[in-house]
Amino acid sequence: MSQFPPGPPPPQPPNGQPPYGQPPQYGQPQPPYAPPPQYGQQPPQYGQPQPPQYAPPPQYGQQPPQQYGQPPYGGGQGYYAPPGGQPNISEPYNSGLQPNIACLLAYLFSLVGGIVILAIEKQNRFVRFNAMQAFIMGVTLFAWNIASAILGFIPVIGTIISIAGIFVGLGYFALIIYMIIQSMSGKYVKLPIIGDLAEKNYPTFLKQ
């Protein structure tokens, strides 16, 4: 009778598990079950930081979340201050007139209305800027009228000034309407040259 050589020993299970073909005994610790990772994902390693969760961008019309400890927009004053420190119509005022009404009166009666609003409004920078701009516009128109009245007696120059005066009057009227609409809607509009003078002088002019 022929003898077969002994074959390789049967494979042994990992340490702590019962031999193959035998059910686990009651009371023995079982290896923890870990679900297999999804395709393309790496299994999380113990002790390594996990990537931050994705935060969706804010919806249209919503303000971005504020960081802890930061004041709200406007420096905690309860209103929004635009970038660059420009005056805003919603700043506090002390004249008793609503800021949009004060701007309307300043531009409507530019020379007199501007200086009156500057005299009674000491706090709202938006109103004071527009009142100063309206006052300078009124002074400019008054100076044009004086110059045209003086030079109007010269035959040729007087005729040119009379024709130019029609366009100056129409342009000034259109500019007044435009500034009333913009200022009453809260938009900060600075005119060339006149706006620079107004921005420079409104903080101190008739402030005391």
Image (cartoon, rainbow, N blue to C red):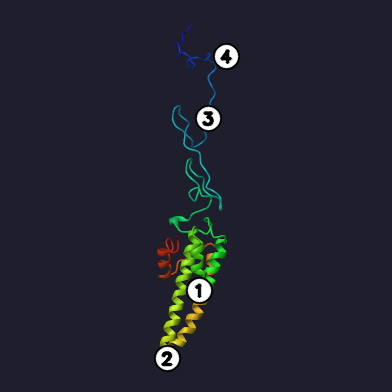
Q: Nearer the viewer, residue 79 or 25?
A: 79
Q: Are marks 4 and 3 in contact (CB under 8 Å)?
A: no
Labels 2 and 3: the sequence-earlier one: 3
Per the model, the C-alpha gap separating discs 3 and 1 is 73 Å
Reading the image, the residue beneath label 1 is: 175
Q: Residues within 10 Å of mark 4 (few under 14, many from 20)?
A: few
Secondary structure type for disc 3: loop
Q: Is residue 109 above or below residue 156?
A: above
In this view, 48 is above or below 68: above
Q: Identify whether 74 is placed above or below 190.
A: above
Q: Are marks 4 and 1 in contact (CB under 8 Å)?
A: no
Dot 4 falls on a residue whose secondary structure is loop
Of badges 4 and 1, nearer the viewer stands 1
Q: What's under tag 2, amino acid-wise?
A: Phe
Q: Earlier in the sequence, mark 4 or mark 1?
A: 4
Q: Amino acid at mark 3?
A: Pro
The residue carrying mark 3 is: 36
Instruction: Tell me the residue that label 4 is attached to.
Output: 24
Q: Is 45 in front, or is 103?
A: 103
Q: Can you identify the residue that label 2 sits on?
A: 153
**Circles 4 and 2: CB distance less than 8 Å?**
no
Q: Are marks 1 and 2 in contact (CB under 8 Å)?
A: no
Residue 159: x and y in percent read: 44, 90
State the image coordinates of residue 71 (x, y, percent, origin top left).
48, 45
